[in-house]
Image (cartoon, rainbow, N blue to C red):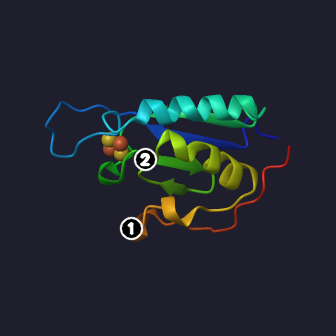
Amino acid sequence: MSRYRRHVFVCINERPKGHPKGCCREKGGEAVRDALKVELGSRGLAKAVRANNAGCLDACAFGVTMVIYPEQIWYGGVTPADVPEIVEKTIVHGEVIERLLIKEPEYRPTAMQFPRLEP
Ligand code: FES
């Protein structure tokens, strides 16, 4: 078995103030990453799911951007308040949260099969 069942990348990229693309750091990427680490740790999932910092994921308009591998679930506009729901529904129960999915076709999951994470 691989070391981690899933990797969750959270963009914390920073750009200069006023940059036309903006950046996930100014939208709270670090707070989302921190909330994810706390939530995974408190649920005993830190050895099964890796929370990773990411540079720009090229989805800046949708930040804070998060992508979950290997299923390629792209979430946008993520806030720390969304993190418990993401862990409970998506990470643990394998449910995609439609409201958080980035709606552009190129970010849609290619395989909607998302197996439940067994403890
Ligand atoms: S700055 Fe976060 S996706 Fe580009």
80 vs 33, nearest the viewer: 80
Above/below status of 2 relative to 106: above
Give the class, few, some or many, for how many residues have Cα within 10 Å of label 1's Cα (few <14, many ≥20).
few
Q: How many marks?
A: 2
Q: Nearer the viewer, residue 95 or 110?
A: 95
Whether ligand 1 has any atom under 8 Å from the Cβ at mark 2 is answered as: yes
- Count neighbours of disc 2 (C-alpha within 10 A) and say few if under 14, some if 14 to 19, many if 20 or more: many
For the point 62% across and 57% down, the residue is 71
The label number, if any, that marks residue 65 in the structure image:
2
Foreground residue among 70 and 30: 30
Q: Residue furthest right?
A: 119
Quick one: SS at disc 2? Answer: loop
Q: Position of residue 117 (x, y in %)?
A: 78, 50
Task: Give the side of residue 38 with respect to residue 17, left or right.
Answer: right
Element class at badge 1? loop
| Quadrant of the displayed image that contains ligand 1 | top left
Q: Amino acid at mark 2?
A: Thr
From the viewer's perspective, tell me whether residue 101 is left or right of residue 24: right
Residue 46 x, y percent position in the rendering? 72, 31
How far across and down, in percent of the image, does residue 87 sit? 66, 46
Residue at figure coordinates x 23%, y 33% from the top left: 15
**Gap in angstroms between the C-alphas marked 1 and 2:** 13 Å
Q: Residue at x 58, y 49 (%)?
A: 68
Q: Amino acid at mark 1?
A: Glu
- Residue 34, above or below 96: above
Badge 1 or badge 2: first in the primary sequence: 2
Coordinates of residue 37 in the picture (x, y in percent): 61, 30
Q: Using residue 101 as the reference point, say whether residue 3 is left or right of it.
A: right
Look at the image and tell me in which quarter the N terminus lies: top right
Residue at the spot of label 1: 104
Q: Quadrant of the C terminus?
A: top right
Please tell me the numbered disc located at residue 78.
none
